[in-house]
Amino acid sequence: MDKFVIEGGTPLKGTLNISGSKNAALPVIAGALLADSTVTIHNIPRLQDIYTFNNVLRVVGAKVDFNESANSIEIDPTHVSYLEAPYDLVRKMRASFYMLGALVGKHGYAKVSLPGGCAWGPRPVDLHLKGMEAMGIDISLDKGYVIAKAGKSVKGGSYTLNPSSVGATVNLLLAAVLRAEDFTINNAAKEPDVVQLCNFLVEMGADITGLGTDTLRIRKVGSLKGVRIHNDPDRIELGTYMIAGAMHPDSELKLTGCNPNQLGNFPELLRQTGTQVDINGTEIHIKAPQVIKPVSIETAIYPGFPTDLQAQWATMLTQAEGESKVTDTVYFDRFSYVPELTRLGANMHVDQNTVNISGKTPLVGASVMSTDLRASVSLVLAAMVAENSSEVLRVYHLDRGYESLENKLNPLGAKITRVEDK
Ligand code: UD1
């Protein structure tokens, strides 16, 4: 397992380009299985989760060609014949569960392993399954696998997601567009990742109304054609680097290739910390404050503060002058990074789904361990402003979601060395 050795205390200065979005790409890659011809997706990041998902598609018989130098992927789904996603692939990445909707939607049958647990507590898939049953798909469980069967056409009806779920909305869309006579998803997720999937499916020929709202109505069409699309930039990578640019008083970053419209209330909250945030088209200019003001946040579904940025925000708040709170209302147990930050000198404690932070405490380098994707990048953020050298272990978590992190940050002043596990 690779680790990072990070010399802290250096500001970040310069320009950094934002990669394509992982979480927006995965639903579209699954959606390509619904087409009758080749789909091409541009702006795909070179990330471990993308490689893993490509392999899931290859297992079922799709031809997947990832042109890494062009960041584009071609998927030919016309030879899919094996309608299963096995446990050893699904356990590596929960989004493999999108195979359930894609395979049953296109082929009327799917056998997909239930995803296991996750570093931030239980992450059920009950809404995916109940929603499909409501649509008229037959769902059964067999030795850790979900088996979904559907006739040529299912009646549809409606299903209300409670709570709103990105994954369930994606799976229900994938299952419905070629099968359901008339199906409505109430309280559907409105995250940009879902909107991109809807736009893609409509471009292919699907009949979906209510795009970008929390009520999606789907009426089946006979077939979907292969199209070419450009994947959105990664709003979570963007938010992470906006926070990175705010944490050292001498930092100043220009972030390019962004979609600032997908940040919800995030830029305004960052401004409240004293950070200068100037948005100009697809560019965002960040200038760190001399003193970070403590700004408490609560995560929420889009366009609220994303749960995928709460660990990074809490890390920044360890360097703010005063008391603050970060509350996660989406995942109640997503604080595994807190004991690690405490080892670096942060003063923070968790109370139920809130972390209370007292700042500013100096951070001093130590060895810390990544436990999940966003936790690991938070440890990197902390190590970059800590005195002396830190080791961040198990950066494979980070490699799942941040494209070439050290190659992007080192030219800006970071001192991050990857030590490969041989
Ligand atoms: C996706 C993102 C993840 C992000 C999350 C919330 C991907 C690959 N992952 O995860 O990075 O943190 O959205 O923005 O895009 N829930 C249920 N039953 C279900 C499904 C979900 O109770 O069947 C609950 C979850 O426990 C959670 C909430 O719904 O409390 C939202 O989860 P969901 O939006 O489904 O997250 P994911 O799609 O798994």
Image (cartoon, helix red, strand yellow):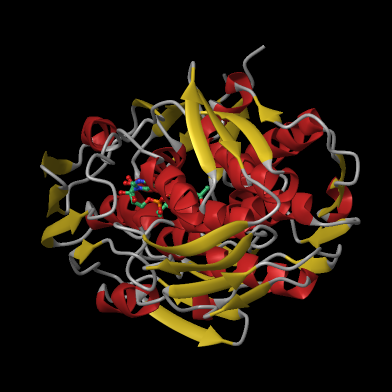
Image location of residue 220, percent across then percent down: 67, 67
Q: Which residue appears at 45% of the width and 79% of the height?
A: 213
> In the depicted view, which residue is nearer to us: 109 or 395?
109
Image location of residue 406, percent across then percent down: 61, 43
Horizontally, residue 323 falls left or right of residue 77, namely left
> In the depicted view, which residue is nearer to us: 228 or 100?
100
> In the depicted view, which residue is nearer to us: 150 or 36?
150
Horizontally, residue 2 falls left or right of residue 157, namely right
Q: Which residue appears at 38% of the width and 56% of the height?
A: 309
Image location of residue 262, percent across then percent down: 50, 74
Q: Which image quarter: residue 2?
A: top right
101 w.r.t. 194: above or below:
above
Horizontally, residue 16 falls left or right of residue 94, namely right
**What is the tally of numbered marks visible in this picture?**
0
Q: Residue placed farthest to the bottom in the image?
A: 280
Q: Which residue appears at 46% of the width and 47% of the height?
A: 133
Image quadrant holding the C terminus, namely top right
Q: Which image quarter: residue 89?
A: top right
Image location of residue 131, percent across then percent down: 44, 52
Q: Which residue appears at 85% of the width and 67% of the height?
A: 227
> In the depicted view, which residue is nearer to us: 195 or 81?
81
Using the rendered image of the protein, determine whether residue 168 is visible from the camera's viewpoint: yes
Using the rendered image of the protein, determine whether residue 412 is visible from the camera's viewpoint: no
247 w.r.t. 63: above or below:
below
36 w.r.t. 262: above or below:
above
Q: Residue placed farthest to the top in the image?
A: 422
Image quadrant holding the N terminus, namely top right
